[in-house]
Image (cartoon, rainbow, N blue to C red):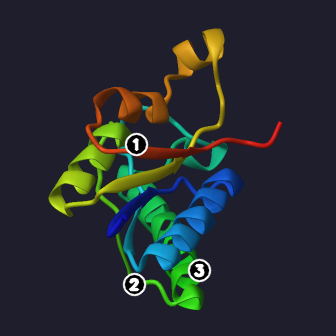
Amino acid sequence: MFRHLLVPTDGSALSEAAVRMAVALAKENGARITGLYMVRPFHMTVYSAEMVGAPQDDLQSVDRARAEQYLDGLRSIAAEAGVECDTEAPTGAHPYEAILDAAKARHCDLIVMASHGHGGIRGLLLGSETQKVLTHSHLPILVVRPPE
């Protein structure tokens, strides 16, 4: 049914659950997966205390290393299941755009991604990358939600 799945990750436990679900689905369908981690430019927001006062190049290096760590984990999960996997870590300010661009460029036919379930005012203020992907994508999307 599906031949190529795109799996964005942010390294969270919920994203790992989405990765595992995507790998299982890919294995069942004889499909391959592409993992994606979005490296964000740091001139916009400080993400943690370690970033205050640090040079931008150092911050980019830290996030690139984080991307490789998360994508290595994704590749390992896929390899254990015997699923073909490649990864990418583009830089940009809008993860949903990177997700949609990667899905189109790689001819994916399904996006599997986590949603942390931020609804209401919190979702409106924080924004939801999953909601943006759902709104703008022409592909089917499998959304993995936290257990209730």
Q: Which mark is residue 125?
A: none
Q: Regarding mark 1 in the picture, which secondary structure is present there?
A: loop
To which quarter of the image does residue 100 belong?
Answer: top left
From the viewer's perspective, tell me whether residue 89 is left or right of residue 104.
Answer: right
Q: Relative to 123, is 142 above or below?
A: below
Marks 2 and 3, how far apart at CA: 11 Å
Closer to the chain start, of discs 2 and 3, is 3
Q: Residue at x 53, y 72 (%)?
A: 23
Residue that badge 3 annotates: 77
Per the image, the residue denoted by label 1 is 42
Name the spot of residue 123 as percent of width and height, x first: 58, 19
Which element is circle 2 on? loop
Residue count near mark 3 (Cα–Cα under 10 Å), binned few <14, some 14–19, many ≥20? some
The reply to whether callout 1 and callout 3 are in contact (CB within 8 Å) is no
**What label sits on residue 84 in the rendered view?**
2
The mark nearer the N terminus, 1 or 3, is 1
Residue type at mark 1 is Phe
- Quadrant occupied by the C terminus: top right
Dot in front, 1 or 2: 2
Q: Residue at x 59, y 89 (%)?
A: 80
- Residue type for callout 2: Glu
Q: Are marks 1 and 2 in contact (CB under 8 Å)?
A: no
Estimate the x, y position of residue 99 in percent, counting from the top left. 33, 48
Front-most of 41 and 87?
87
Q: How many marks?
A: 3
